[in-house]
Amino acid sequence: QYYWYDERGKKIKCTAPQYVDFVMSSVQKLVTDEDVFPTKYGKEFPNSFESLVKKICKYLFHVLAHIYSSHFKETLALELHGHLNTLYTHFILFIREFNLVDLKETTIMDDLTERQKSLESTPKASLSPLNALNPVVNQLYKQFFVFHPVS
């Protein structure tokens, strides 16, 4: 179950696709707002710029965590897992370098982060994408979802 806070601060219950749409729409609105991300020489960034960037990064992290927890098998089938892993690794390095997302917010993905770090020194020929990340993905499934047997 996901929740989004609208512009008035009202908490809205939503599905994962709705949440992702809210995130992407909100991020696009912010990054195209000339008052938030000025493109004209001499125009000042707002005092709230840092908090807005942190908010954007936190929401984008939620989307990445959702993709891993709910759609990783599809990324494997489409052979997009390498791109997803690269995006995730770069994103984590960036947000940690500039302290953009609270560490306690990202702990849910620490196993994957550590796995990605260990893969950097592993020869590519010895890795099967499914075998390399499957324990992490299975753990994410367990953390995010309660499974009900199909009768």
Image (tube, grey):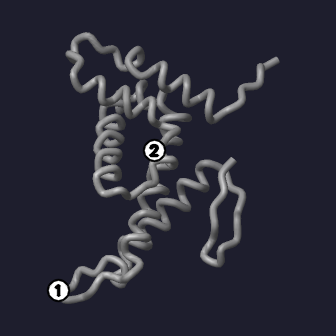
- Residue occupying image coordinates x 54% and y 54%: 20
Q: Amino acid at mark 1?
A: Tyr
Residue 42 visible in the shown view: yes
Label 2 sits on residue: 64
Mark 1 touches mark 2? (CB < 8 Å): no
Quadrant of the image occupied by residue 34:
bottom left
Under tag 2, what secondary structure?
helix
Which is more toward the observer, 136 or 148?
136
Q: Is residue 119 left or right of residue 47?
A: left
Q: Is residue 105 left or right of residue 79?
A: right
Q: Amino acid at mark 2?
A: Leu
Which is more toward the observer, 14 or 60?
60
- Residue occupying image coordinates x 52% and y 38%: 108
- Residue occupying image coordinates x 41% and y 25%: 76
Under tag 1, what secondary structure?
loop
Say if 44 sits above or below 106 in the image.
Answer: below
Label 1 sits on residue: 41
Q: Is residue 147 left or right of residue 95?
A: right
Which is more toward the observer, 1 or 110?
110
Quadrant of the image occupied by residue 45:
bottom left
